[in-house]
Structures are given as structure tokens and as C-alpha cells.
Amino acid sequence: TFKWANWAGNYSCVAENYFEPETEEQISEIVKFAADKEKKIRVAGTGHSFSPIALSNEILISLKNYRKLIHIGNNTITCQGGMYLHELYTVLKENKLSLSNFGVINKQTVAGALATGTHGSGLKHGSLSSGIEKIKLITASGEILEIDHNSEITVDGKKLNLWEAASVSLGMLGIVSVITLRCEPLFYLKSEESVIDFKVFTECMDDYASRYEYFKAWWFPHTDKVYLFKAERVGEQEYRDKEQFENYTAEQKKRDREIDSQTAPMFIKSNKDNSLIPGINQHCLDYFFTPRTRIGTGFDILVHDE
């Protein structure tokens, strides 16, 4: 048996069988074993979801030993499903490449981030899964299925697009073995971050969302304030000269590094005493979410090393 818990610690399970396969053949063998025993399988990534989606008291698989880079080209990257996003991003940066969009968290597995619909920022881009060119799945029978944008299946006389189903599958279509993602050349962003009144935000949010390639906002309950993030692309020269344009102090960088370790105890304490929440929200806004201007690669600006 094996005890597993998700990242937040709000869900856990004890699996009867737990596997860490290293090859595609081993994954297929596990699936066939499950079929023979009539057992259910779930695949756990890093457990970032706050839901019980990865729980299994029967068979649980981790792809932590199945995360190799397979190929990198001029506009695509291919890797095994268990590769962590921060590993994928490191390879992309080393090759002067980037994805068009990112989720904030970089600790997820590639397969897990795609299957659960991890999204980025802004109306001009889809979720991470919209960048999938090809995906290889191991189905419930142990069969290996390769899917691209044109792959279809006929059910009750109706043709269904398999690529759409595989892109955000919630783990229900099969075990993701290999993924090919579309890339673009490494790009640079300038972000303007500020605090505005909630009422002002509701009046301008549609305009900002349509105007900026990357745009997001955090409303802080009990403060009547919203923290705005607006980012646009800049050239490499402005990136190289960023010290002339940035307004991002050493103190702000220090607080950004400490945000997780300092806020987690507050949130845990507030579970037992809800009256603390308004004060925590105000403190977090005032102390951590201070206005700044930053310039960096897309990775630097859009991804948080949480």
C-alpha cells in the first residue's frame, strides 16, 4: 500500500498498488494488469489540483521517473508526460524558445497541467493545451494511440475530434505518454502592476483585457481593491537595458521570494479563526502586492516559482 496526498493536503488516499514506471512498455503492462484485476487506475502528477481528481484506493501511478526530453526543434518540443514544467521551461530557455502562454505555477507535470486545463493570462491565448501538436496516449486496453489535430473517432454514427478530448481530458481518456507542444522564439515582456479601486476595475476591465496581450487581476476581498497585471511584448534591446525602465526594488524582490513561506501560516491559522481573514487580506495587499514595473523574458514575468 502507498499513502498519497495532494499539494494542498486537503485530499489523500491509500492506494492498494503504487507504480513508478520508467518506460512506455511498463505503463502498458500496468494498464493490462489493472484490466486483468478489474482495478481502477489514476495517475498522480504533483497533486496541484485542490480536488480529489487523482485519488485511487486501487492503483495509483506516478510518472516521476518518466519525464525525459525526447526532441526539440525550431518550433516544437517533445517530452514524456511526467516532465515537470520547470524542467520543460529550462530546456526551452536554453534553446531560446518559449511557449506562447504559461500557467503561473511551474511545479506541475506537463501531462497534468494540460489534462486539467491549466490556463495563462489574457484573451489572446488559449490554455496550455491549445499548444498541443501531438499527443500519445495509452488507453484502458494498453493500446498506444497517437493523436493529432485531425484524429477522429466515430461514436453512434457521429464523428468526434479526439484532439479536443485529449487536450483537456482530466485523465479520463488514457495515460499521457508523450506530448509535442508548439513553440515560438523566446520573447520579452514589460509588465505594469498597480492597485486600483474595485469599482474602477469593473469599469475598465473589458478594455484592459482586449488591449493587453497578457492581463490578469486579483480582487482582495475586504479591501475593495484590485491588483492589476498588464503586460506587453518589448524588444530584446529594451530587455537588455531594463535597469533604465524597471521600477522593481530589492525589497520587493525579497518579499516576492518570501510570500509563500510567510502567508501559508496565516492562511492555516485563519481556518480556525475566520475573523483573521480581513486583516490578512489587507496585509497581503499592502505588503506583498505593491506597484512595480518589470521587464523580463516571458518565463520571468508570467511564471511564479511557487
Image (cartoon, helix red, strand yellow):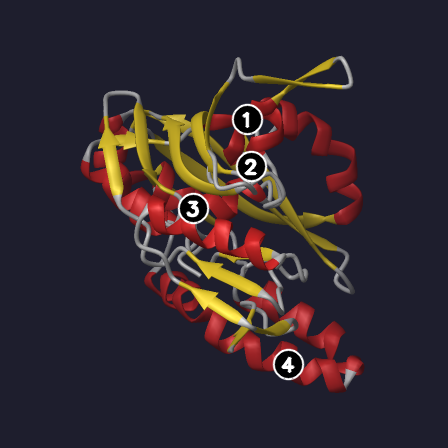
Observer-nearest of 225 and 104: 104
Q: What residue type is labelled 3?
A: Ser
276 left or right, relative to 170: right
Identify the mark nearer the N-term, 3 or 2. Answer: 3
Q: Residue 100 occupies which quadrant of the picture?
A: top left
Please report contact status of discs 1 and 3: CB closer than 8 Å, yes or no.
Answer: no
Residue 62's place in the image compared with 196, above or below, is below
Q: Is residue 104 visible in this depiction of the protein?
A: no
The disc, 2 or 4, on the residue closer to the chain's N-terminal end is 2
Q: Measure the alpha-carbon separation of dots 3 and 2.
A: 36 Å
Q: Mark 2 points at which residue?
A: 121
Which percent across, then down, holds residue 185? 29, 24
Nearest the viewer among 74 and 83 is 83
- In the picture of the structure, the residue carrying the numbered disc 1 is 125
Instruction: Report helix, strand or loop for mark 3.
Output: helix
Give the mark nearer the N terminus: 1 vs 4.
1
Say which mark, if any, is on residue 28.
3
Q: Dot 4: what SS?
A: helix
Between circles 3 and 4, the one closer to the viewer is 3
Which residue corresponds to mark 4? Answer: 268
| 19 left or right of 216 in image | left
